[in-house]
Image (tube, rainbow, N blue to C red):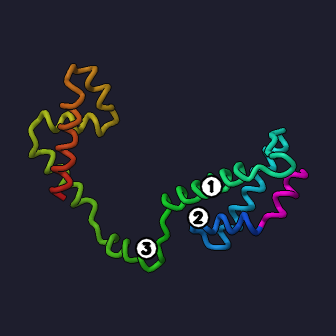
Amino acid sequence: MEILKKLFEKHKTWCEIVESFGCNPETAEDITQQMYFKIGKLVEKGTDISYGDGVNYFYVFRTLTSIFLDYKRKESKTGIIGIDELDMQFEGSEDVEYDKEYEKVLQGLAELYWYDRQVFEIIENGESISELSRKTNISYYSLYNTYKKVKKYLKDKL
């Protein structure tokens, strides 16, 4: 654990490095703490991260970079929506009459060519396109394109 003491002596430097990546000070502090935790686990397992008498700074830099990139990936996958925006998204959704919409779908299916309707119904009932292709010896892409065409037609109908 001597390594962690040496790491902590440069705590301010590690935080400044993470801030140079574009983080605010609080996030930089969190990422630095995660780096201590990660390196502490590695040291417990027996990994040697020392370089001469001190710490391998390149290894610490790579660890900080890795944690920062993981943070950014997670941040890009999640969005923050205000409560006002959320209310606006659902405004008027209670007024949908599902029975009428379902009737439109059934009417749209009735207007289709029998082959298109059959392919769509079989796939919608849980059969995968690849299974249907193997059973009927019809090309996978032909079935896929038919299914996609029917879905588009029904969406346009609604």
Mark 3 sits on what residue?
86
Front of the two marks 3 and 2: 2
Which amino acid lies under the numbered mark 1 shown in the image of this protein? Thr
Q: Earlier in the sequence, mark 3 or mark 2?
A: 2
User: Residue 58: percent from the left, percent from the top?
Assistant: 70, 50
Label 3, label 2: how far apart the Cα atoms are: 32 Å
Q: Is residue 128 left or right of residue 49?
A: left
Label 1, label 3: how far apart the Cα atoms are: 34 Å
User: Residue 7: percent from the left, percent from the top?
Assistant: 81, 58
Which amino acid lies under the numbered mark 3 shown in the image of this protein? Leu
Q: Is residue 24 above or below residue 143?
A: below
Q: Is residue 134 left or right of residue 61?
A: left
**Is 6 part of what is drawn in magenta?**
yes
Q: Earlier in the sequence, mark 1 or mark 3?
A: 1
Residue positioned most to the bottom? 84
* Residue in front for this viewpoint, 132 or 103: 132
- Main SS, magenta region, reads helix
Q: Which mark is residue 65?
A: 1
Residue at (70% x, 67% y) in the render: 15
Mark 2 sits on what residue?
21
Q: Which span is picked out in magenta?
A: 1-11
Q: Secondary structure at mark 1?
A: helix
Label 1, label 2: how far apart the Cα atoms are: 8 Å
Q: Is residue 144 above or below residue 92?
A: above
* Residue in front for this viewpoint, 45 or 65: 65
Q: Secondary structure at mark 2?
A: loop
